[in-house]
Amino acid sequence: MHAIASDEVPLSADAVWAVIGDFAGIRKWAPAVMEESVDRNAPEGVVRTLKMPPDGRVIRELLAAQEQYAYTYKFIGQHRFANDYQCTIRVVPIDAGKSRIELKSEFVPRPELNAEEVVGNMQKSVSGNLKAMKRALGLPKDA
């Protein structure tokens, strides 16, 4: 299953990527993350560890793929809602002053949970991340 959020923004792909494209710099656009660290020499590969509010829950994510204006990360360990969770963040250049931000998460709902609710929660998550990215870019969430 998947959840997708995307929107065009009135900024170049380079300008957008400078804010949202750093796997090791998620706090540039996700201020709710309490703490972040990146281990470039983890046995799995490049792994970021995030401490999340309100209870300090720890999340570990593996950088699975990276290319110009895109990266994919995979969740390490037990996700609250899903198994086999991965997300791709991509910026698609449209012209010199416009680009499109795309977020796509792919996952398998945990069997003990309602699949429709899981999809809804994942959709809220990618949509919320897109809004946070736009705020970090100095854009209104509706821009």
Image (cartoon, rainbow, N blue to C red):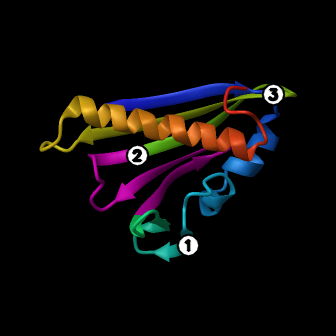
Q: Is residue 73 magenta?
A: yes
Check disc 2 and give the amino acid type. Answer: Gln
Check disc 3 and give the amino acid type. Answer: Pro
Magenta-tinted stretch = 60-86
* Tag 3 residue: 10
The answer to whether one can see residue 69 in this image is: no
The answer to whether one can see residue 109 in this image is: yes
Nearer to me, 123 or 15: 123
Image quadrant holding the C terminus, namely top right
Give neighbour class at mark 3: few <14, some 14-19, many 20+ (Cα, 10 Å): some
Q: Which mark is residue 37?
A: 1
Q: Which mark is residue 71?
A: none
Who comes first in sequence, dot 2 or dot 3? Answer: 3
* Tag 2 residue: 86
Who comes first in sequence, dot 1 or dot 2? Answer: 1
Where is residue 103 shown, x and y percent of the image?
53, 36
Disc 2 versus disc 3: distance between alpha carbons? Answer: 28 Å
Name the chief secondary structure element in magenta.
strand
Nearer to me, 115 or 55: 55
